[in-house]
Image (cartoon, grey):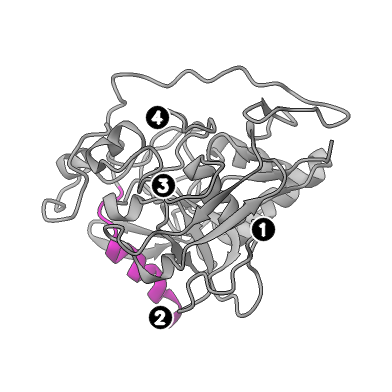
Amino acid sequence: MTRFIPILAAFALLAGAFGVLAQSRAQGPVDVPARVLTGGPAPVLAAGGSFTDCEECPDMIVVPAGSFTMGSPEHEEGRNSWEGPQHVVTIARPFALGRFEVTVDQFAAFVKETGYQADGPCWTLEKSKLDSRQERSWRDPGFQVDGSFPALCLSWTDSKAYVAWLSKKTGKDYRLPSEAEWEYAARARIAPGSGPRYGFGNDAAAICANGNGFDQTGKKIIPGTTTWSALYCFDGYAYAAPVGKFAPNQFGLHDMLGNAKEWTADCYHEVVGYRGAPDDGSAWVSGECRQHVQRGGSWLSYARLLRVAFRYKGPDERVGDVGLRVARTLSAP
């Protein structure tokens, strides 16, 4: 049971439960530009350009080079000590990041082609009880999903296997993003300086227009949640939403705030926060690596947990609100 304490602690911070899918947002999906299917030599793409390397591959956005201030300032409301010390990170070269979280359809293509076993058990919160349920998996995370939803119930090992398959299939360097790359892309800033708490701004009441967290929709639909911390707005979803239902950030990336927590390549370093972390955007993988960093919050997260600097940690287990977003190294021009 000891090794599951981090999972229990994480769920204790969350608000929400799994169950029946909420009704779709009335405004409908955000328009997504047509993707460019690449082949042969790597295309020359400007920052903000988009491409995909195969029909089953994720849509990718070119993230520009730049620098940013990683972590949260000491005065930020809701801050944790392990979100600091703040430090400047330089991303020297552009890289590509998935426009969306990896979807059920995309993960299904990987499983079909390789025979990879990614079925249960998965830790889910159902009927107010957290448990490891053998019948739950990315196919059925405890609520209704279709191919356009983020693939959930994915472990760090599952995620690594998926990006390895993409690399082999395309001949390109697919990988999990580093924690620094993830925060840089979520902040969508190319110069140092403390940015807003939520990427888009500081107003928690505006979160529902920008992402899917635990909101009044969840409180209304999920029994027993009336005393839970929740957003003071309605995003239209009690549970996960299909990817791309919310407006993109300034880099053209959707769902960086909420919907599914996303694995990064980094080990989580207890106690030290960012003391000793790389300043070049690379993944911090030295030392003991019992857990890995997750970012972004999920449909179970309230305002404090949706701050762009908030850091989750997780053991290599499948949990019902955790998925992934892929990164790709771009060839030098």
Tell me the SS state at disc 2. Answer: loop
Q: Nearer the viewer, mark 4 or mark 1?
A: 1
Residue in front for this viewpoint, 192 or 201? 192
Q: In the rendered structure, which disc, 3 or 1, sits on the residue that comes first in sequence?
A: 3
Residue in front for this viewpoint, 259 or 97? 97
Magenta span main SS: helix
Crowding around mark 3 (Cα neighbors within 10 Å: few <14, some 14 to 19, many 20+) is many
Query: Could you tell whether 300 is left or right of 220 in the image?
Result: right
Name the amino acid, label 1. Answer: Asp
Name the amino acid, label 2. Answer: Met
Q: Nearer the viewer, mark 4 or mark 3?
A: 3
| Residue 264 lies in the magenta-colored region | no
The residue labelled by disc 4 is: 246
Quarter the C terminus occupies: top right
The residue labelled by disc 3 is: 195
The residue at the point 45 percent across, 59 percent down is 71
Q: Nearer the viewer, mark 1 or mark 2?
A: 1
The residue labelled by disc 1 is: 280
Residue in front for this viewpoint, 172 or 131? 172
Q: Which dot marks residue 1?
A: 2
Alpha carbon of mark 2 to alpha carbon of mark 3: how far? 39 Å
